[in-house]
């Protein structure tokens, strides 16, 4: 865990900084969120989440792509901050409560998955760089095989989560609109 501590601190700081930036941007942007609440609909979360997981996989294999993963986590932080601030501007404290419920149900677990994939990617990049420098003599297949297993497990988990989200969690989110 100590080896992953720095990667966890890095990913959390990227997320928190982008969360604050998104919140400030949302406060300064006059976007009306009330129309969004009326039209909460099931979208293509399964396809989008699988696409993001594949993006993380291929960008991690390219070594330099770990930066893309960091930028995507930053983008997620900005979008979460923007949603919270837009609900706050429109509905006040009740909007913050509703947006946090909505985000925890719809995005919470996926953001945790992205954090995990970022940490796995950093570990992979470190191992590959130590191979390139000559500190280690592991074969590339030895490095990629455990990562592929982790990504396949994440894909299965993401599919189950998105199906649960599609059939159950959207109904819960619509139920909580009474808060507003």
Image (cartoon, helix red, strand yellow):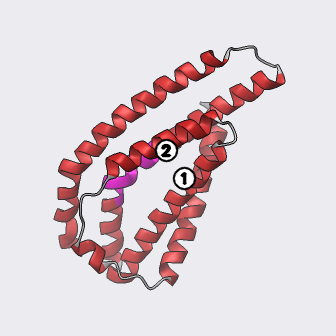
Residue 131 percent across, percent down from the top left: 76, 22
Q: CA distance from mark 1 to mark 2?
A: 7 Å
Q: Are marks 1 and 2 in contact (CB under 8 Å)?
A: yes
Q: Is residue 151 left or right of residue 105?
A: right
Crowding at mark 1 (Cα within 10 Å: few <14, some 14-19, many 20+): many
Residue sitting nearer the eye, 91 or 169: 169
Q: Is residue 72 left or right of residue 100?
A: right
| For marks 1 and 2 on the same chain, the one whose residue lies earlier in the sequence | 1
Q: Is the stretch drawn in magenta largely helix, strand or loop?
A: helix
Q: Is residue 121 above or below residue 108?
A: above
Residue 42 percent across, percent down from the top left: 24, 58
Q: Is residue 180 above or below residue 162?
A: below
Q: Which residue is mark 2?
A: 114
Residue 112 seen anywhere in this rendered image of the structure: no
Residue 22 seen anywhere in this rendered image of the structure: yes
Question: Element at badge 2?
Answer: helix
Residue 62 percent across, percent down from the top left: 65, 36
Question: Element at badge 1?
Answer: helix
Quadrant holding the C terminus: bottom left
Residue 164 percent across, percent down from the top left: 23, 44
Q: Is residue 106 magenta?
A: yes
Q: Is residue 46 magenta?
A: no
**Residue, x 54% and y 26% (percent of image)?**
147
Q: Is residue 135 left or right of residue 73?
A: right
Which residue is at the far bottom?
A: 30
The magenta stretch is: 103-113
Q: Total of numbered circles in the picture?
A: 2
**Residue, x 41% and y 70% (percent of image)?**
84
- Quarter of the image for residue 93 reads bottom left
Mark sitting on residue 73: 1
Quadrant holding the N terminus: top right
């Amino acid at each position: 865990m100590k080896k992953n501590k720095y990667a966890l601190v890095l990913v959390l700081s990227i997320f928190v900084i982008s969360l604050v930036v998104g919140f400030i941007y949302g406060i300064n942007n006059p976007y009306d969120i009330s129309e969004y609440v009326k039209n909460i609909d099931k979208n293509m979360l399964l396809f989008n989440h699988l696409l993001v997981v594949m993006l993380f996989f291929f960008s991690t294999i390219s070594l330099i792509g770990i930066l893309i993963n960091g930028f995507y986590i930053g983008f997620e932080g900005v979008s979460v901050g923007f949603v919270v601030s837009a609900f706050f501007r429109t509905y006040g404290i009740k909007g913050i409560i509703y947006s946090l419920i909505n985000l925890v149900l719809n995005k919470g677990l996926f953001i945790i998955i992205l954090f995990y994939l970022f940490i796995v990617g950093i570990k992979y990049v470190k191992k590959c760089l130590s191979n390139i420098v000559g500190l280690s003599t592991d074969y590339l297949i030895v490095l990629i095989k455990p990562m592929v297993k982790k990504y396949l497990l994440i894909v299965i988990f993401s599919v189950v989560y998105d199906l649960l989200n599609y059939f159950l969690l959207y109904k819960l989110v619509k139920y909580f609109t009474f808060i507003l």
